[in-house]
Amino acid sequence: MREAISRLQAAGLVETRHGVGTFVVGMGDPSTFRISPDQLGTLQDVIAVLELRIAVETECAALAAVRRTPENPVTLRAALAAFTAALEEGRDAVGPDFQFHRRSPRRPRTTTSST
């Protein structure tokens, strides 16, 4: 995990504030954050990437749960069914997987304060 954060810092994509956390500071060039096969030379490299994915995907799932609307579970279930069907039929599931992630809530819901 530390190595992954270090690489993101080196690319200028995140900033770490001691005692506070790590924050995204810019999107940078979309082509700059790629993990190429030559970066996965050791088992430790693979583990570092998996740890990064676990951290990012867990936080994304938590934010999606907080930001959900009544319609989101319906669209997510449909996307998951398409993904499952592709796997069960031996088809490529990249498209359905992408659609599942695209349908996850991204933006905060607008809330109305009664005060």
Image (cartoon, grey):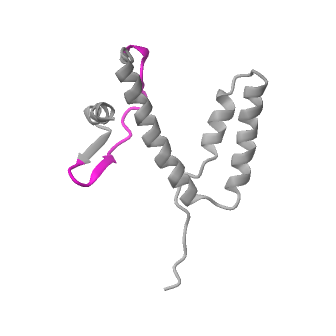
Front in this rendered view, residue 78 or 108: 78
Q: Is residue 32 visible?
A: no
Q: In the image, 112: left or right of 47?
A: right
Residue 67, quarter of picture: bottom right
* Relative image position of residue 43 (x, y in whole percent): 38, 19
* Main SS, magenta residues: loop
Range shown magenta: 17-38
* Relative image position of residue 112 (x, y in whole percent): 55, 76
**On screen, residue 106 above or below 6:** below
**On screen, residue 13 above or below 104:** above
- Which quadrant: the N terminus? top left
Residue situated furthest left in the rendering: 18
Residue pictured at 69% horizontal, 54% vertical: 73
* Relative image position of residue 104 (x, y in whole percent): 60, 48
* Relative image position of residue 54 (x, y in whole percent): 46, 38
Q: In the image, 6: left or right of 113?
A: left
Asked if the magenta segment contains residue 46, the reply would be no
Front in this rendered view, residue 47 or 63: 47
Front in this rendered view, residue 38 or 114: 38
